[in-house]
Image (tube, grey):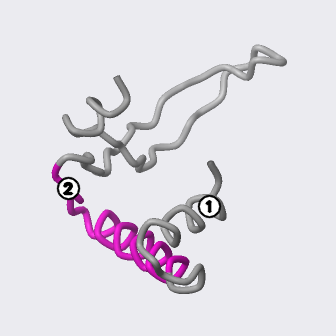
């Protein structure tokens, strides 16, 4: 499912227009991004939680040439699924 399909599904289940569903989804994405950018955890009970982890700088290898390269430290988003979401999938 891509973003357009998700917007259509949200609109169908909530009786919103696609424009309103898109606004709601975009607002969620923006709020979630700002929350994690501030170092906070975003928890949606039953769905899961989003958090930011920091990866340390490390050495790696270029798979084509085999030369050693430095991989910079960076922040990554981590998602842990909630119990209800896991039960829906299984």
Residue lying at 62% horizontally and 48% vertically, measured from the top left: 1
Q: From the top left corner, tell me how far across and down residue 66 is, in percent.
A: 76, 14
Identify the magenta region. 21-45
Q: Which mark is residue 80?
A: none
Read off the residue under disc 1: 3
Residue lying at 59% horizontally and 33% vertically, measured from the top left: 70
Read off the residue under disc 2: 43
Residue lying at 27% horizontally and 70% vertically, measured from the top left: 38
Judged from the image, the secondary structure of the residue bearing numbered disc 1 is: helix
44 or 50, which is in the foreground?
44
Q: Which label's residue is closer to the chain start, 2 or 1?
A: 1
- Separation of marks 2 and 1 at Cα, in angstroms: 21 Å
User: Which quadrant: the C terminus?
Assistant: top left
Where 46 sits versus 90, above or below? below
Q: Quadrant of residue 30?
A: bottom left
Q: From the top left corner, tell me how far across and down residue 40 is, in percent.
A: 21, 63
Please tell me whether residue 76 belongs to the stretch shown in magenta.
no
In this view, the mark in front (2 or 1): 1
């Amino acid at each position: 499912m891509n973003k357009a399909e998700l917007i259509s599904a949200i609109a169908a289940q909530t009786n919103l227009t696609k424009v309103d569903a898109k606004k709601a989804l975009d607002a969620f994405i923006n709020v979630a991004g700002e929350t994690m950018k501030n170092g906070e955890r975003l928890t949606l009970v039953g769905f899961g939680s989003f958090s930011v982890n920091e990866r340390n700088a490390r050495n790696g290898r270029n798979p084509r040439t085999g030369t050693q390269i430095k991989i910079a430290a960076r922040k990554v988003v981590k998602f842990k699924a909630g119990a209800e979401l896991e039960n829906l999938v299984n």
